[in-house]
Amino acid sequence: MVLVDTSHPGNIGAAARAMKTMGLADLRLVRPARFPAAEATARASGADGVLAGARVCASLDEALQDCGCAIATSARSRTLAWPELTPGAAAAKLLEGAQEATSAVVFGPERSGLSNAELDRCEAMLRIPTDPDYSSLNVAAAVQIVGYELRLACAAAQVPTAAADEQPARLEDMQRFYAALEQILVEIDFLDPANPRLLLRRLRRLFNRARPSDVELNILRGILTAIARQGEKARAFRERNPL
Ligand code: SAH
């Protein structure tokens, strides 16, 4: 968990406590206003070990240096620029990423939240659903909820369910699929390569929500291959029958 520009040391302590209850220990603090602080230790209760191990960093880049998957949290919906995940979907993505490198969740300052530049450093945004008229949780409460979702996701990954014979598609396979999809969409003139960004983001968001299994992804890949084959047939036909 990465806390950026936290102004109240009490919140750092409460976040450490929230983490410990969920079995998490890697806490990174980017430019905390005051740390270490007696108030942080007091609010950590029995979780002072997490505080003692916390790494203070000068920038978000430094905190994320060894991280693969990084997900930002925000109380507000932003633009489509950042795919928005539910806590559950984010937890699944973080766990998957954790197989290859450290995964990170980034929390913003109490007053302003994360800047757009900080959100840009992350691959997706997690928003905890709330009452739309009052969406801003205390930062340590947000840490608690995300930690809980991670714990649930871990438990689900360890206890195979009836559908467990179909593994969720691997992230890199999804990336390859997106690249192939983009190529086909350009080829069939559905996507303007000069201005592709919004459509592709929307499609990624759709597939992220669906979280296809490896079997389902194979079907999707098969469809792309079939479309490509039709395109080749049409090209060959045109070549044989020039107008
Ligand atoms: N006014 C700020 C709120 C900051 S609350 C804003 O509009 O973004 C401090 C931090 O707690 C946020 O930066 C975020 O990391 C976390 N947080 C608070 N409410 C959240 C929510 N509903 N979903 C996800 N994170 C939330």
Image (tube, rainbow, N blue to C red):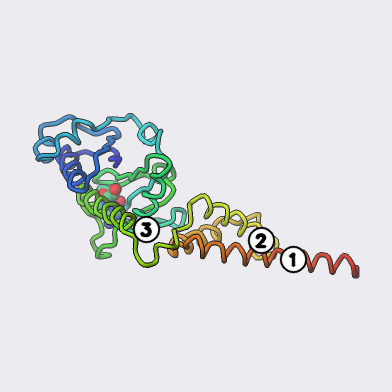
* Residue under label 2: 184
**Callouts 1 and 3 close, C-beta under 8 Å:** no
Disc with the residue nearer the chain's start (3 vs 2):
3
Residue in the picture at 60% in, 56% down: 196
Graded by Cα atoms within 10 Å as few (under 14), some (14 to 19) or many (20 or more), the crowding at tag 1 reads some
Pointers 3 and 2 in contact (C-beta within 8 Å): no
Image coordinates for residue 155, horizontal then vertical, percent: 28, 55
Task: Please name the amino acid that badge 2 sits on.
Answer: Ile
Q: Which residue is mark 1?
A: 231
Who's the residue at 62% across and 56% down the image?
180
Count the marks.
3
Residue 118: name its quadrant.
Answer: top left
**Other-residue count near label 3 (Cα within 10 Å), few / some / many at <14 / 14–19 / ≥20:** some
Instruction: Where is residue 39? Give x, y as percent.
Output: 11, 36
- Of the two numbered discs 1 and 3 on the same chain, state the one appearing first in sequence: 3
Label 2: element kind: helix
Q: Label 2: how many residues lie within 10 Å, few (<14), some (14-19) or many (20+)?
A: some
Residue at point 26% right, 59% down?
Answer: 135
Of residue 33 and residue 185, the one placed in the foreground of this image is 185
As rendered, which of 232 and 206 lies closer to the eye?
A: 232
Is any atom of residue 75 visible in this view?
Answer: no
Q: Earlier in the sequence, mark 2 or mark 1?
A: 2
Tag shown at residue 121: none
Image coordinates for residue 27, horizontal then vertical, percent? 26, 37
Identify the element where label 1 is drawn: helix
* Type of amino acid under label 1: Gly
Could you give the CA–CA distance between mark 2 and mark 1, rounded to whole angstroms?
9 Å
Residue at numbered disc 3:
89
